[in-house]
């Protein structure tokens, strides 16, 4: 039983760390956004980062960006399969980032 738990932890912890690092990246991307023309560039950066981190975000429809003069909102949705012993857990993850835009 202990071996099964250890194998599960071996898969879950790296997945959780990747998801947390991706969340940090999204927060940084939102904080750097400052005008509407950046939306396609930010969307592509998010897709590239997800690919680099081996997260299943490959379609632009999974990334929604709303930029106004005062706020930037980023929403990314995906399902991350986690291979556990005898079972594949489908972790449905939604990242919602909402930040105020500061123009210097």
Image: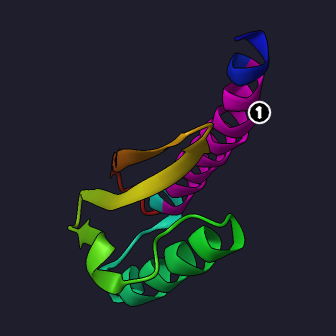
Could you tell me which residue is drawn at 38 percent across and 57 percent down? 79
Quarter holding the N terminus?
Answer: top right
Quarter where residue 84 is shown: top right
Mark 1 crowdedness (10 Å alpha carbons): few <14, some 14-19, many ≥20: few
In the image shown, does 94 or 25 lie closer to the viewer? 94
Residue 42 visible in this rendered orientation of the protein: yes
In the image shown, does 75 or 14 lie closer to the viewer? 14
Could you tell me which residue is drawn at 20 percent across and 67 percent down? 68
Secondary structure beneath label 1: helix
Horizontal arrangement in the rendering, residue 46 relative to residue 100 (left or right): right
- What is the span of residues highlighted in magenta in the rendered image? 6-29
Could you tell me which residue is drawn at 72 percent across and 41 percent down? 14
The majority secondary structure of the magenta stretch comes to helix
> As displayed, is residue 30 above or below residue 38?
above
Residue 27 visible in this rendered orientation of the protein: no
Question: Residue 21 placed where, x, y %?
Answer: 65, 46
Question: Residue 85 placed where, x, y %?
Answer: 62, 37
Horizontal arrangement in the rendering, residue 14 relative to residue 100 (left or right): right
In the image shown, does 56 or 84 lie closer to the viewer? 84
> As displayed, is residue 10 above or below residue 93?
above
Question: Residue 39 placed where, x, y %?
Answer: 36, 82
């Amino acid at each position: 039983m202990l071996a099964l738990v250890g194998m599960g932890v071996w898969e879950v912890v790296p997945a959780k760390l990747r998801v947390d690092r991706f969340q940090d990246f999204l927060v940084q991307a939102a904080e750097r956004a400052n005008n509407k023309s950046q939306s396609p560039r930010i969307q592509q950066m998010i897709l590239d980062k997800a690919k680099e981190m081996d997260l299943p975000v490959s379609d632009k429809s999974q990334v929604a960006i709303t930029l106004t003069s005062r706020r930037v909102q980023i929403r990314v949705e995906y399902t991350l399969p986690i291979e556990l012993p005898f079972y594949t857990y489908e972790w449905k993850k939604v990242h919602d980032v909402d930040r105020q835009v500061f123009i210097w």
